[in-house]
Amino acid sequence: MEVSSTNSINGEIKIPGDKSISHRSAIISSLTIDTVIIKNYLFSQDCINTIEVLKKLGVTIEKLEENLVVYGKGIEGFKEPGDVLYVGNSGTTIRLLAGVL
């Protein structure tokens, strides 16, 4: 067996979506006054609950292929929801949004 050395490595790594980062990226994006594309968003049930709560607060969010597009409302742009904000079993959603609201 012969082992050769190399001076560099070239490539691309795609890591799986992360639940904690996905929650935070959607919430923070909703607080901006801008359109934010979140790549590799984890569409788990908890993270979907975060999206649904943000939608009830008036944030426009859409899934575009594997990405999430958030049209930020600004820090004072949330509206009062007409229904209960259901977070399911997502402790992260309730903890983070309780602080934001």
Image (cartoon, rainbow, N blue to C red):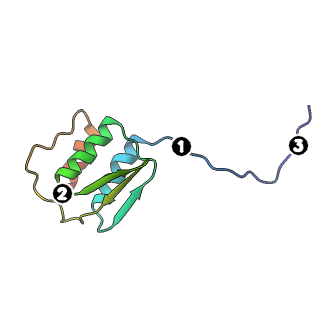
Q: Secondary structure at mark 3?
A: loop
The answer to which quarter of the image holds residue 85 is top left
Q: Earlier in the sequence, mark 3 or mark 2?
A: 3
Which quarter shows the N terminus? top right
Q: Position of residue 18 (x, y in %)?
A: 43, 42
Disc 3 target residue: 4
Q: Who's the residue at 41% across and 47% down the image?
A: 41
Q: According to the image, label 2 marks what residue?
A: 58
Q: Residues within 10 Å of mark 3 (few under 14, many from 20)?
A: few
CA distance for labels 1 and 2: 31 Å
Where residue 29 sits, quadrant-wise, is: bottom left
Q: Amino acid at mark 3?
A: Ser
Depth check: give the residue in front, 67 or 12: 67
Q: Position of residue 78 (x, y in %)?
A: 17, 60
Which class describes the residues within 10 Å of circle 1: few (<14), some (14-19), or many (20+)?
few
Using the image, determine if residue 51 lies above or below residue 91: below
Q: Is residue 1 left or right of residue 43?
A: right
Circle number at residue 63: none
User: Which quadrant holds residue 77?
Assistant: bottom left
Q: Secondary structure at mark 1?
A: loop
